[in-house]
Image: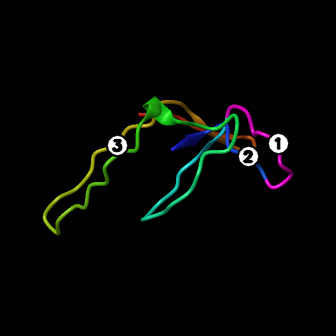
C-alpha cells in the first residue's frame, strides 16, 4: 500500500492510497511512503475458507448513505 502516491500530473495525491497487487518491482517516488513502512504478505484462501469483514465508516453513494456494520 503506497501512501500519497504520485499522480499522472506528477503531483502527490495527498491523503490517498494505492494498492500494488502481484509481483512488482518499483521505486518509491519522493513523497511516497509504504503503509506501516513495510511490504505486506498476501494470503490465499482455500476453497473451504472465507473472510469476515466489517466497514470502518459509512459509504456515501450520491444522496444514499449505506450504514457500516
Which corner quadrant of the image does residue 31 belong to?
top right
Q: In the displayed structure, would residue 33 be above or below residue 41?
A: above
Which corner quadrant of the image does residue 44 belong to?
bottom left
User: Does dot 3 land on a helix, a strand or a loop?
Assistant: loop
- In the rendering, which numbered label is found on residue 65? none
- In the rendering, which numbered label is found on residue 11? 1
Q: Residue at x 38, y 38 (%)?
A: 54
Q: How many numbered marks have been drawn onto this rendered protein structure? A: 3
Disc 1 + disc 2, Cβ < 8 Å: yes
Which corner quadrant of the image does residue 49 belong to?
bottom left
Determine which residue is flagged by label 2.
6
| 11 sits to left or right of 67 | right
Determine which residue is flagged by label 3.
53
- Quadrant of the rendering where the C terminus is positioned: top left
Q: Residue at x 42, y 65 (%)?
A: 23
User: Does dot 2 land on a helix, a strand or a loop?
Assistant: loop
Disc 1 + disc 3, Cβ < 8 Å: no
Calculate the distance from the C-alpha at mark 1 to the C-alpha at mark 3: 33 Å
- Find the residue positioned furthest to the left: 48
Spot occupied by residue 18 in the image (x, y as percentages of width and height): 59, 48
Label 3 crowd bin: few (<14), some (14–19), many (20+), radius 10 Å: few
> Which residues are drawn in magenta?
8-15
Label 2 crowd bin: few (<14), some (14–19), many (20+), radius 10 Å: some
In this rendering, the label closer to the viewer, 1 or 3: 1
Q: Residue at x 77, y 50 (%)?
A: 7
Q: In the displayed structure, would residue 24 be above or below residue 14?
A: below
Amino acid at each position: 500500500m503506497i501512501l500519497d502516491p504520485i499522480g499522472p500530473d506528477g503531483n502527490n495525491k495527498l491523503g490517498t492510497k494505492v494498492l500494488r497487487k502481484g509481483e512488482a518491482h518499483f521505486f518509491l517516488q519522493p513523497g511516497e511512503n509504504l503503509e506501516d513502512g513495510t511490504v505486506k504478505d498476501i494470503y490465499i484462501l482455500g476453497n473451504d475458507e472465507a473472510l469476515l469483514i466489517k466497514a470502518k465508516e459509512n459509504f456515501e453513494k450520491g444522496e444514499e448513505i449505506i450504514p457500516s456494520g
